[in-house]
Image (cartoon, rainbow, N blue to C red):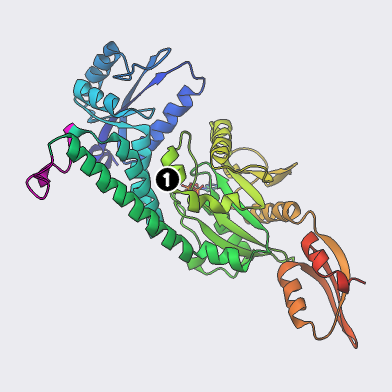
Amino acid sequence: MIDNQSKKTKAFIAGVNLNDPNFEYYMTELANLTEANNMEVVGRAQQNAEKVVVGTYFGLGKINEIKAMAQGLKAKVLIINDELTPVQIRNLEKLTKLRVIDRTELILEIFSSRARTKQAKLQVQLARLQYELPRLHPSENNLDQQRGGGFNNRGAGESKLELNRRTIGKQISAIKKELKAVASQEELKSARRNQNHIPKVALVGYTNAGKSTTMNGLLKTFTDEKPDKQVFVKNMLFATLDTSVRRIDMDNNFSFILSDTVGFISKLPHNLVESFKATLQEAKDADLLVNVVDSSDPNMIQMIRTTQEVLNEIGVKDIPMITAYNKADKTDRNYPQIEGNDILYSAIDEKSIKLLADLITKRVFSDYESFNLKLPLAAGRDLAYLHEHAQVTKEDYEDDGIMITANISPSDQAKFKQYLV
Ligand SMILES: Nc1nc2c(ncn2[C@@H]2O[C@H](COP(=O)(O)OP(=O)(O)OP(=O)(O)O)[C@@H](O)[C@H]2O)c(=O)[nH]1
Ligand SMILES: [Mg+2]
C-alpha cells in the first residue's frame, strides 16, 4: 500500500471560491477525481474571491503561497477546480513551476484511461481534440519538428498554428465519421429496432452509485444468466463508459429492456457530454428512468442534484423516474422498502432486486389493462406477438378459437380491437 502510494504522482488541488455554497463538495469531487486518475492528493488550497483573475486565475499572493506549500509537499502537479483558459494554464505553470491540470483535462484523462470499446475510445478522443483545438498556441507548436518538411514556404508561427488547426480539424471530422459507422453497428440499434414495443428502462445516476451492480442483480434474478452477459462492476469512478442493453423477462410474463450507462459527476465537460451523445441516447429514449443513488454517501443530496443537472443538460425531460436509494446495507436503515415512488434497497441483495423489479413493473405497465380476447386458431403470429408484448394470464384452446386473457398496452389494445370479447 505504502509502496503503491509513493509511486503515484503527488498532486496539490486548489480552487477559487466565488461564494458558492457547494464549493466544499466540488473540492471533494476534485480530490476523488484526482485519486481516480491515479494521483495522490497531498494538499489543498482555496481563495475566496468575488471573481477569478483573468490572466492567472488566482491572485499573485495566493499563487506564491500555493507554490511554497506544493514544494514543501513535493507535489508535481497542480489541479484546479475549474476549467481554465489556455493563458491561465500557461501563466500558472510559469509562476508555480508545476504542471497544471484543470478539471476538464482531469476528467478527460480519466475517461481516456477507462475507455475500452472502440466507440468509447473514439468518443473520448473526439472530446479531447475539441478541448485542444481552441487551446493551440503558436509558441507551443507540436509540429515544430516537421520544420523543413513540406512547409518551407509557409511563414513561422501563425501559419504553423493554422496547419495544426487544420490537422486537428481533419482528425475531428474523421473521428465523427468513424463514430457514425460504429453507432450503426451498435447492439443498441438492433435492440431498438427489434424490440421497439417493449418498454425501455434506463439506469442513470452518479458515478459509482451501483448502476452496473443493479443491472447484474436484475440479470441474475430474471434471466438464464450467462456470466458473459453480466456488465463490468468496479469500485472506481467511471467504471462504465459504454451503454449495455439487455432484455429482462420477469417471472410474471412482463418484459422490459434495461440499459446501463456512463455515470455522472458535477461540471461534466460540455464536449464530453456532446461526444457521448450516442451513449446517452438510451436514457433519452427511455420510458422510465431509475436514478440510482448511493444512500450511504454523506453527499447523497448533492449527487442527486448533480444527476438532475446532467440529465437537463443532455435534454432528458418529462420521463417518469424512480429514485433508487442503493447500498442500504451500508446504512442502519431497514431494507428493502418502498417509499411512494422510490425504493431503499441494496443491489447485492436478491430480495431487494425483486422488490425493485416489482416497482419498475408497476410504473412501466401502469397503463396496461386486462382484456379477454378470442383469436382465430390460425392467428399463430398474433398469439406469439401477445406472448412477447403483453402479459398473458390465461390461454384456452377451444374448437373455434383461442381464448386469451392478457394485460395489454394502450397501443396494442387498438391493434387487437377486432378480437375483443
Ligand atoms: N455494499 C454495497 N456495495 C455496492 C452496492 N451496489 C454497488 N456496490 C459497490 O459499489 C461499487 C460501484 O458499483 P458499480 O455497479 O460499478 O457502480 P456504477 O454506478 O455502475 O459506477 P460507474 O459505472 O463507475 O458510474 C462497486 O464496488 C460495487 O461492488 C450495494 O448495494 N452494497
Ligand atoms: Mg457502471
> Quick one: quadrant of the N terminus?
top left
Residue 342 shown left or right of residue 207 in the figure? right
Measuring 37% from the left and 50% from the top, which residue is drawn there?
A: 114
**Amino acid type, residue under disc 1 in the picture:** Met
Residue at the outermost front position:
153
Question: Which region is colored magenta?
Answer: 139-154
Q: Is residue 342 left or right of residue 24?
A: right
Q: Between residues 175 and 276, which one lies in front from this camera angle?
A: 175
Position in image of residue 118 (x %, y %): 38, 59
Location of residue 385 with respect to 11 vertically, above or below:
below
Near-viewer residue (267 or 300): 267
- Looking at the rendered image, the quarter that the C terminus falls into is bottom right
Identify residue for label 1.
Answer: 236
- What residue appears at the point 73 percent right and 77 percent down from the top-left corner? 384
> Is label 1's Cβ within 8 Å of ligand 1?
yes
Residue 259 x, y percent position in the rendering: 57, 56
